[in-house]
Amino acid sequence: MPDDSRLRLIRALGDTLDGLDVALCAFDDSDRTLAWNSTFFKFFPEHAGHVYVGEPYEANLRRFYTQRLDAQELPNIERYITAGVERHRAQNRPYSFEHRGLRVHVSSLPIDGGGRVRVWRAEALPAQSASIDMAAQSSADIHEPGYLRSPVIESTELFDRIPDGLMICAEDQRIQWVNQPFMQMYHLPDRATAMGLAFDEVYRHAWSVGGEGDMAPFYDGLSTLQEHMRFAGAPFEVPLPRSRWSRVIAKQGSDGTVFYAHVDITELKRQQRLLAQAERSARDSEAQLREKSILLEATLEHMDQGVAKISATGVVELCNRRAMELLDLPAELMASKPTLVNVLAYLRARGEFQGASQEVQDLLRHSNGGVDQPQVYDRPRPDGRILEVQTVPIKGGGALRTFTDVTQRKQAEQQIRHVAEHDGLTGLLNRTAFLQALQSATDVHRLGRGFAVLYVDLDGFKPINDRYGHAVGDQLLVWVARQLTQAAREDDVVARLGGDEFALLQRGVSDGDSAYRLADRLVQALGRPTEIEAHALQIGASIGIVLSPGDGTEAEELLRKADSAMYLAKATGRGCARIYGT
């Protein structure tokens, strides 16, 4: 408990913040209310007339959640309150959320000598955004919305080593985090400069620092990015100062977070520009074609991009060194000026197209090899590399076909997707990815195949976590994930839903007996003692079971019912399993 002088100082600070329209509430080291100011009730009127000195923070949270939860989520209020108290004790960075038509920014810091102070600043939402947010409030994150819990933000070292720029934005398109290559690409002095900005503001900054001379590319690029940033859709390209280019690729998460990869394609643009210039010159006259072809061939031989030119009669008239390297084509074959059909037959015989999609295979079986229309597609090679193949028809017949090794870029995109879909501690699927797998399973069951969902909640985990610390607790969660994975079949799906809650999708189940037997094996496995860092530990598990299609055909509904059955298992003594409805 702070002394009287410190408490008077906190109250004086609260009165001062009232003049700035900033709310304050202070708590002692036991999470009991110490002091608050008038603006606190302005932002959170549900607390007016109820807060008192010594009130536990969990009572404060109970009022907050009672106002915010709908009828479906209200039974989970105790679990939400417990998680909210833990977040309150551990918060070390600001975040924001929407509440009663306001965007509220909250920060929290410990008080020297014990306790914690929380302050809130609010701003009105734009009219259109506010109406959308109020309409969707019941389906929003019912915890303290906007609190970024993703392990991606914590893994800065990993993403700073990726060669491409990475930008992570919240649902309002404001930047939450960027990596080191992004800062270099857009002339940012540090990471903090980008926080809270929109991408178009960062783009303007890059041109204000590095732009000079003709600013027409800037206005073209600004128009392009403003059009594409309205949604996470197809990749787009924007010009940067000093004749550089960036390709922007978006991946949107189910929680509204959007991951943007920024790939430097300056060299690719330069090579495309050289090809276009050479092609225009070649069309001027046959004499110019002979002269320019020498320059073109010299350029092509030193490019990092593979290039092939196919004539109107289907002959591969030109194939540079890089194309032969990327496709493992023998020099003697290409020197003989073969037809494209013969080259494709040679590659097909070597199994080059086995990993390609059926659409690409059908295209390459076309009589002219698919050179009569513009095409861009990715093709995996047998050696594991991925090539981006682009075809540009030439006026009068024939085409230019380019081959670009995009393996590194695809691996980076795959890594981003993996992080977005998996739990950073255990490596299991996260809640969002598990719900997607569960919904896919409901579609399959319509073909006559049932399944079961097991909702696993650990018994006795919190005391171990509190006593031995989070490092031991994390290792214990990894051990639990390993037990679940070992008990599951290859066709089953295991996920960590959050905290000490897990789930398992058991496919091919027609009755409750096999699901119950699996649950019993899990209870026995998780109840066995284990040793972590010389500590002999023992926990238990309570499991809820639902069967589909009998108990439902929607992913959210099934998971909710499994959660309900799990709470019945806890209520009947823990360390057991209950089937929903029994």
Image (spheres, rainbow, N blue to C red):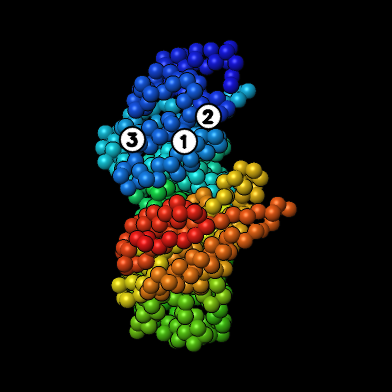
- Residue at horizontal 42 percent and vertical 16 percent from the top: 18
Amino acid carrying mark 1 in the image: Tyr
Q: Where is residue 361, by image quadrant?
A: bottom left
Q: Which mark is residue 67?
A: 3
Q: Where is residue 92, by image quadrant?
A: top right
Badge 1 is on which residue?
A: 95
Q: If the image is split into quadrants, where does the C terminus sit?
A: bottom left
The nearer-to-camera label among 1 and 2 is 2
The residue sitting at the right extreme is 534
Give the class, few, some or many, for how many residues have Cα within 10 Å of label 3's Cα (few <14, many ≥20). few
Residue 501 rendering spot, x and y as whole percentages: 49, 53
Name the foreground residue: 248 vs 230. 230
Badge 2 is on which residue?
A: 31
Name the foreground residue: 139 vs 281. 139
How far apart are labels 3 and 2 at the CA level?
Answer: 21 Å
Name the foreground residue: 108 vs 126. 108
Q: Earlier in the sequence, mark 3 or mark 2?
A: 2
Give the class, few, some or many, for how many residues have Cα within 10 Å of label 1's Cα (few <14, many ≥20). some
